[in-house]
């Protein structure tokens, strides 16, 4: 499988999440044991809930463990250039509506649309990768094809993105 880009801060965050999830295991095992001690498991809601929680926890741990060897950890403070690449903050303008949007290109495990970042693997991310200020791109979106112009490409680093 291909390498997956992630910021140094994103890697630290996911590593902490993995540690926290593993630390929850004993409490869940204890909850299962207590529910099991109550007797009949066929109608034991506490047992079912604890087992479901355990399943979700183990699934997330497994997912993170499977991703860790694939991560290509990048230092956002060391990136620069004129092209839209991982770590770049890009401003685009919809050519039809003249609406402007600004977002930072991050990896799929880093990106958070609510915080102004998108994945380099998203349709928009893929369309603008490698482009420079003044270039035009077409993005296939749910509402149809949208044509954008790259207004600016900047590298703000981790501090500029509030990732520290």
Image (spheres, rainbow, N blue to C red):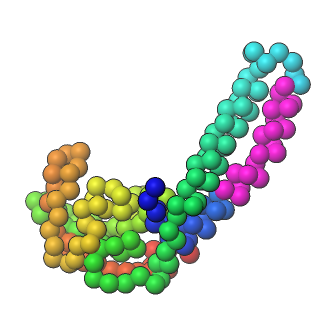
Q: Position of residue 110 (x, y in %)?
A: 48, 62
Q: Position of residue 19 (x, y in %)?
A: 71, 58
Q: Residue at x 44, y 59 (%)?
A: 2
Q: Position of residue 119 (x, y in %)?
A: 38, 60
Q: Residue at x 75, y 15 (%)?
A: 42
Q: Quadrant of residue 57?
A: top right
Which one is nearer the viewer's eye here, 75 or 159? 75
Q: Which residues are magenta?
A: 18-36
Q: Residue at x 16, y 47 (%)?
A: 144
Q: Tell me how many marks there are.
A: 0
Q: Residue at x 46, y 62 (%)?
A: 4
| Residue 158 appears in the picture as rendered | no
Q: Residue furthest right?
A: 37
Q: Quadrant of residue 120?
A: bottom left
The relative height of residue 84 versus residue 4 in the rendered view (above or below) is: below
For residue 19, side relative to residue 70 (left or right): right
The relative height of residue 158 versus residue 128 in the rendered view (above or below) is: below
28 in magenta: yes
The dominant secondary structure in magenta is: helix
53 in magenta: no
């Amino acid at each position: 499988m291909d390498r997956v880009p992630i910021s140094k801060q994103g890697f630290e965050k996911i590593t902490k999440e993995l540690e926290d999830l593993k630390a929850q295991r004993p409490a869940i095992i204890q909850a299962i044991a207590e529910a099991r001690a109550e007797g009949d498991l066929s109608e034991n809601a506490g047992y079912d809930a604890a087992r479901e929680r355990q399943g979700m926890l183990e699934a997330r741990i497994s997912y993170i463990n499977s991703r860790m060897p694939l991560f290509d950890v990048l230092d956002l403070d060391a990136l620069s250039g004129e092209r839209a690449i991982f770590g770049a903050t890009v401003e685009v303008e919809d050519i039809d509506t003249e609406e402007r949007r600004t977002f930072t290109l991050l990896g799929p495990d880093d990106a958070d649309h609510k915080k102004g970042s998108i994945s380099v693997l998203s349709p928009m991310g893929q369309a603008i990768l490698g482009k420079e200020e003044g270039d035009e791109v077409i993005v296939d979106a749910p509402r149809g094809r949208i044509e954008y112009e790259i207004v600016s490409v900047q590298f703000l680093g981790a501090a500029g993105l509030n990732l520290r």
